Image (cartoon, grey):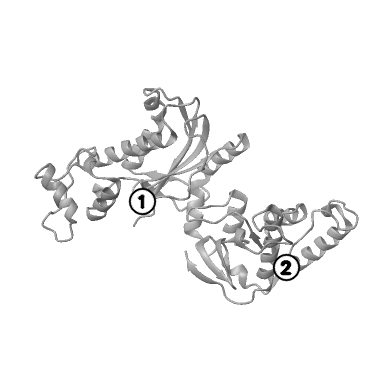
Amino acid sequence: MINTSYRPRNPGHDYYGKGIYLLTLVVRGREPLLGSLSNDATHPEVHLSPLGEVVRQTWERTPEHQAAHGNHVVVHAHVCMPDHFHGVIEVLEPMQWNLGDIMQGLKAACTSRWWQMQGLASSIDRPNSVDRDNPNIPVWLRKKAAIYSTEGALIRHLSKRQRQEYYALVGRERRPLFDDNYDDTVCIDERHRQAMIAYVHDNPRRAILRHLLPDVMQRCLHVQIGDRSYGTFGNLFLLRWANKVQVQCHRRHPITSEPYEETADYAQLHNQWLTAILCGATVIVTPGISRGELQMKNECLEKGYPLIHIQKEPITPYWKPERQRFDACANGSLLILAPWGLDQMADVNGVPSNSDYGCFHNMNRLTEEICSFTGKAKIIRR
């Protein structure tokens, strides 16, 4: 069965109200129907197919189409990739429709145009087209065809589950263009909006780099490291480095209560970490939670020092890091690890593992495990 969603949408969010969203639609089966990419990461470019032009034009006409239904939206940055689409949309006033209705209308319009380009009827009012003498055709579909017409039941007469089964039987050109679901990220503030737009504009370059540098730009959903499973993104070869140095800092100095990153003890540790890095064959391992850890993590990213960064956020099938970490992965200097089941680890000093305190200590515990790991990581699922 086709996986038709990326991750659960934001529970409790009002999708009828005002807001800004980064939206992602994926072509069914990840087929590159919308265009092709250049292979030059310094001048990234997407060459749109006629179908890609249709998707772009349909997106740009969304405000006009929605205004006819009393919904006031504007569209910002967008990019049509060969097998998916990203766009930023802003809802200006509360709507009678929700965001899902708008996206369904966009997908339906693109699918209708695609069917028209293939000479098919452009709506779900067309009959289904299967060979009813085929023994693989389910009984329910034969019955539907017999009831409604000699040509076959209209597609709109099929339930969602029946449509999925029907689309699995017919050729690709008779299926909807996009996956059933879509992904949305809710904008938090102006800085987040700018980051969304930057991500959309940077998408072609990212895709080219992942294509050109597969060894250091791997995304794996489950990698077994010792007794634990992680999602990973980046250069897995860093796990094989013999000298892995843990960076762990308190928020406050245990004696003076000063911010730890401002103390002489931190300066001494930083000197030791830097010396180890410059001697070669050393990779820093840290979750970057406390300010001192964060400073060292950022220094590694800025200067290209080898880094294994352990993060709380899960790495899902379509998760991608922000630009700075993405570029560090492209340079081969970064591996991102996201432990599965972090909130199910043991309590810390009686504090639940899903609390900030428990998470902080357990992530540093995982950092210690990674530093002592000497075996070979096993990729279970890419």
Q: Residue at x 39, y 25 (%)?
A: 64
Disc 2 vs disc 1: Cβ atoms closer than 8 Å?
Answer: no
Q: Give the mark nearer the N terminus: 2 vs 1.
A: 1
Q: Is residue 15 above or below residue 46?
A: above
The amino acid pointed to by label 1 is Pro
Which one is in front, 364 or 191? 364
* Callout 1 secondary element: loop
Q: Is residue 337 visible?
A: no
The amino acid pointed to by label 2 is Val
Which one is in front, 178 or 86? 178
Q: Horizontal and vertical percent for residue 34?
A: 36, 45
Q: Horizontal and vertical percent for residue 82?
A: 39, 48
Q: Is residue 316 visible?
A: yes
> Which residue sits furthest front?
350
Q: Horizontal and vertical percent for residue 285?
A: 69, 64
Q: Give residue 305's quadrant in the image.
A: bottom right
Q: Is residue 204 above or below residue 234?
A: above
Which residue position is annotated with label 1?
32
